[in-house]
Amino acid sequence: MRKNIVAGNWKMNNDLAQTHALITDLKKQTQTSKAEVMIAPTYTSLYAAFEALRLDKIEVIAQNMHFANNGAYTGEISANMLKSVGVETVILGHSERRAYFDETDELLSKKVDAALENNMHIIFCFGEELNDRKTDNHFDIVESQIKNALFHLPESTWNNIVLAYEPVWAIGTGETASPEQAQEMHAFIRSLVLDQYNNDVAENVSILYGGSVKPSNAKEIFSKPDVDGGLIGGAALNAEDFFAIVNAFNMSY
Ligand code: 13P
């Protein structure tokens, strides 16, 4: 079944003490929405976050991983290392990884395979840059990012995949895709999955929106039929704002 998810991507923010402080604040919040809640702290805080949230419903997820299980890859972290500290879900393909760390569709496809081989869940990110949208190439870009990294997968693995549309021009800029722009793209993405697989896979895959989601715009974005939740950056660093977004997910949507 399609899940509603609100995930906080902390990016390279919060050291260990700050992680504990934010989790303490998160635990004080009450949840009135049906959305599943996830947070993605940085690697050095993952285990502490997992321990601190062991009895809580908030899932601790990772921001990235390497495709190999172990070996001579200085500075990298593998799927089984993440699993050994309680992490079952990983974000892959974030535009910051693509832009600053040269992650290509080909590399991401290998990471996707490695995560699935390790029975992990994936939040797979993609999205166009401003110029792509200005030149009306946004659908083509999104289509190729999804096809190249995911469409070799067998149908059975799609239970482990969540998609996250994050237009690069809306990330950290304060500029948000309008609810109509988000819906238009999400419906397009679902139609791609339908064409490649079938109605079951298309209807059951959750598609999150990311890019300057705030308490003030979350409800409108989440009310769209093909928007199943959000991937939240800046606003996830404040417990009240984050839960205002989580709770913008109305039970009746
Ligand atoms: P902002 O919410 O800060 O725009 O970041 C979105 C994002 O990149 C989530 O992965």
Image (spheres, rainbow, N blue to C red):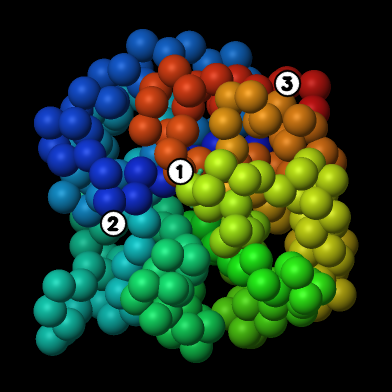
In the picture shown, does residue 189 fall above or below 105? above
Residue 188's place in the image compared with 148, above or below, is above
Label 3 crowd (10 A; few <14 / some 14-19 / many >=20): few
The secondary element bearing badge 1 is classed as: loop
Residue at numbered disc 2: 83
Task: Tell me the residue that label 1 is attached to.
Answer: 233
Q: Can you say which quadrant of the picture contains the N terminus?
A: top right
Query: In which quadrant of the rendered view does residue 244 lie?
Result: top right
Which percent across, then down, holds residue 102?
A: 39, 81
Frontmost of labels 2 and 3 is 3
Foreground disc of the pair 1, 3:
1
Q: Is residue 240 left or right of residue 196?
A: left
Q: Horizontal and vertical percent for residue 28?
A: 36, 11
Q: Earlier in the sequence, mark 2 or mark 3?
A: 2
Mark 1 C-beta closer than 8 Å to ligand 1:
yes
Left or right: where does residue 147 sit relative to residue 61? Answer: right
- Give the residue drawn at x 34%, y 50%: 11
Q: Amino acid at mark 2?
A: Lys
Residue designated by label 3: 251
Q: Earlier in the sequence, mark 1 or mark 2?
A: 2
Tell me, yes or no, whether the two marked residues, 2 and 3, touch with CB atoms within 8 Å: no
Task: Label 2, secondary structure: give it.
Answer: helix
Q: What residue do we see at 26% from left, 44% from top?
A: 13
